[in-house]
Amino acid sequence: MADMPEYEVYAIKYGDHNRMRSENFLFKDPHDEASSIDFFIWVIQGGGKTYVVDVGFEQKEAEARGRSLHRLPSEGVRMLGADPNKIEDVVISHLHYDHAGDLDSFPNARFYLQDREMAYCTGPCMTHAPLRHAYAVDYVVNMVRLVYDDRVQYVDGEMQIAPGLSVHHIGGHTDGVQSVRVWTRKGWLVLASDANHFYDNMAIPNPFPIVYNVGDMLDGYEKLRALADGNEDKVIPGHDPQVLSLFPAASKELEGIAVALHEDPIGDMDKVWRRTK
Ligand SMILES: [Zn+2]
């Protein structure tokens, strides 16, 4: 479309954690097996700029929670040839520990955050241990400091960051989780982040068990499809290890680390989405 760059979009894996597949679903799923949850950030390039979506966790939090950190999220940005010091726009999908830890590595960035996310993670719900468990209080406090430094761009619902690049409130997983919609050579691509964790959560559907509002989470899956113009193949989940094998590597050197989401999939999307031909 006119006036919109065709952005290049990359998923970068920065960590992982082994667990049972059944831990990914709120409702019982009989097909249990060993599996992994992968931790990603995303980089968007186009119109002469680089944008980052989420900033992962750092070593201290990885140790506290028994997660494997393969590289700092900002290091992943560097591997794609961008300098974290020069990044001006960072979208924070929500403030859970695995999305909001490496803030200091982006000293010149403005952070896009939903009003409702900050209200949720500093409000009355956090008196409930199960709801605050996935937040790291230091990361939340860091974000509060950034508000006072004029470096947080609050969003109420949706906002265009640049032509062909916008954020959209989804909710469900947390009250303020947001996703990113970006224009690419193959049309609208949606980075769900934790509005959808695994392909199966949305495909079955069977929600991820860390959830503030189950109804909003299920509605959110439909919102994500709509943002992708009805093409679920273009909705990228936040934690699914299959992403690394479904899309081509960003480069030979980055095999197993970063994939190009704007390229056509190299895996079987019908199988991923449980579609019968
Ligand atoms: Zn997450």
Image (cartoon, rainbow, N blue to C red):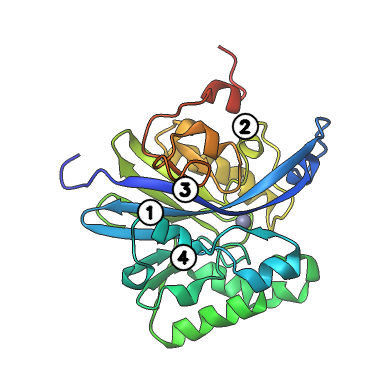
Between disc 4 and disc 2, the foreground one is: 4
Q: Is the CB of mark 3 within 8 Å of ligand 1?
A: no
Tell me the residue that label 4 is attached to: 74
x and y percentages locating residue 235 in the rendered image: 48, 39
Residue type marked 2? Ala
Residue 228 against residue 192 in the figure, above or below = above
Q: Residues within 10 Å of mark 4 (few under 14, many from 20)?
A: many
User: Can residue 149 be seen from the camera position used here?
Assistant: yes
Task: Measure the alpha-carbon separation of dots 3 and 2.
Answer: 21 Å
Q: Which mark is nearer the camera, 3 or 2?
A: 3
Type of amino acid under label 4: Ser
Q: Does residue 133 appear left or right of residue 238 in this picture? A: right
Q: Secondary structure at mark 4?
A: helix
Q: Earlier in the sequence, mark 4 or mark 2?
A: 4
Q: Quadrant of ligand 1?
A: bottom right
**Disc ID at residue 80:** 1
Q: Secondary structure at mark 1?
A: loop
**Labels 4 & 1 near each other (Cβ < 8 A):** no
Disc 4 to disc 2, C-alpha distance: 31 Å
Q: CA distance from mark 2 to mark 1?
A: 31 Å
**Residue carrying label 2:** 203
Q: Residues within 10 Å of mark 1 (few under 14, many from 20)?
A: some
Q: Is residue 158 visible?
A: no
Mark 4 in CB contact with mark 2 (< 8 angstroms): no
Q: CA distance from mark 3 to mark 4?
A: 13 Å
Q: Is residue 49 left or right of residue 182?
A: left
Residue 155 percent across, percent down from the top left: 42, 67
Q: Nearer the viewer, mark 2 or mark 1?
A: 1
